[in-house]
Image (cartoon, rainbow, N blue to C red):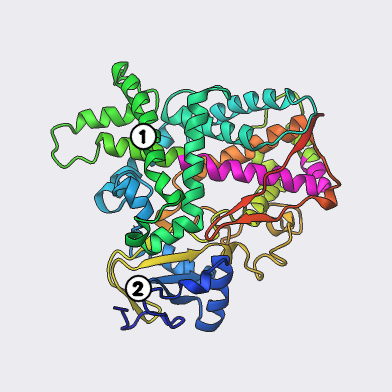
Amino acid sequence: MYRKGRMPPGPTPLPIVGNVLQLKGKRWDEEFSKISEKYGPVFTFYFGTEPVVVLHGYEAIKEALVDHGNDFSARAKIPLVDKVRQGKGMAFSNGKTWKQMQRFSLSTLRNFGMGKKSIEERIQEEAQYLLEQLHDTKGQPFDPHYLMTYATSNVISSILFGKRYGYDDKRFQALIALSEDNVKIFTSIWGQLFNAFPALMEWVPGPHQQVIPNNAKCREFVLEEAKEHRATLDPSSPRDFIDCFFIRMDQEKHEEASEFTMENMVSCCVDLFGGGTESTSSTLKYGLLILQKYPEIEEKVQEEIDRVVGRSRMPSMADRGQMPYTDAVIHEIQRSLSIASVSIPHAMVKDTLFRGYVIPKGTKVFPVLISVLHDDKEFPNPKEFDPGHFLNEDGTFRKSDYFMPFSAGRRNCTGQGLARMELFLFFTSILQNFKLKPITDPKDIDVTLLVKPTSRFPRPYKFCVIPR
């Protein structure tokens, strides 16, 4: 049965399939943009027999996720995710589980220096390893995918597991490969079909059937690390996230309904590892590609690095305030990439009156983030790469409320502070030490993105780095 009542208007659904045929082979954000022109910034779209409320544009998304943040703060049930998470962990949980895991994860990240000196030192240390690997390419063409992925993975690994892994560590490589494979499946048409028709897709062979075994191997990795941690735990001197979790587990061991269980520990680690790797490494890869396309932008960034940092020390977060052009370039890379074109679905905590409509409790909500990041009033020529989008006329950095690559409100990205530090420190360290050398003429470089239904990724490419 289709729910009518006072839900927002939208295209008429077909029996059983709803509106999904409108998305066949298309980018969801582009299709949603067309629908919003007819029905407005808040409309209903049916995935099968399930109504989803779509939010399009800055005003609607801010009003929902920020001004009515509590009402829109639940995480929607996503069948393919539920198969592996079963309501555990942080990213896809709800209620008491989410509140406690979110609060614990944020405070632990902060205690281990998110936004403080100690994490900055971890990133700087990893940047040194990355620079050594780049030197070892000896000016020959290479694919940056693995180096950028291993570097960003090691930062989150140092917080979760208390150590970094060698770039040739087979267990580490296998964990990353499993995590990447699941991201591909979740963002593929197979993943979307499973989420729309779970009962049917359970019986259909395809890549979506690989999610469970992949997740089991990721859990096995975390459990091995946890076993080692448990044997050497010193409650007076926690080394990392796992130690902190064990300490809290011990404190609450007599509480029957404690959320601090092994299941939640493992799920939080898998959530944070995946979230702390994919988007940051993809942004780095895309940024290095864009700078090859526009060597004049690369030169201006390097001039600013030379002027503010010099060559005798590593860049630090304290430099960022004196580097408005570099900061603007990094923001523009994130805006231009818009890696999550459509946010991970939210859900209504309760029946909510919103803009004259009644959205029932549990209804899925899709915020179309790219509609904010590519708003042509805030960012003239949004499809063009232009650091001027984040610069005032006098060359100072220009903040924008429309900058939402990490979403907004209570369900925004837990690790966004860490991601911002990584992007600044990795980019500036690379450009301080190397000139980027494309293997084709800059004007022939293809910066178009690989577009999935709700995500965008840089294409594979090779290039060279030349020591400065």
Q: Is residue 437 above or below residue 6?
A: above
Which numbered disc, 1 or 2, marks the residue that appears first in the sequence? 2
Residue 277 on the magenta segment: yes
Q: Is residue 234 above or below residue 439?
A: above
Prevailing SS of the magenta stretch: helix
Q: Which residues are magenta?
A: 274-301
Residue 200 picture quarter: bottom left
Which amino acid is tagged 1?
A: Arg
| Residue 95 appears in view | yes
Residue on which disc 2 sits: 49
User: Which residue is at a point 29% across and 48% down the rendered structure image?
Assistant: 86
Q: Position of residue 189 (x, y in %)?
A: 50, 58
Q: Position of residue 313 (x, y in %)?
A: 70, 25
User: Which residue is at a point 38% across and 71% down the rendered structure image?
Assistant: 48
Under circle 1, the secondary element is: helix
Residue on which disc 1 sits: 219
Frontmost residue, 83 versus 100: 83
**Horizontal relation, residue 457 to residue 290: left or right:** left
Which amino acid is tagged 2?
A: Thr
> Label 1 vs label 2: CA separation?
34 Å
Which residue in the rendered view is the most extreme toward the top? 232
Q: Is residue 442 above or below residue 240?
A: below
User: Which residue is at a point 45% across and 30% down the rendered structure image?
Assistant: 159
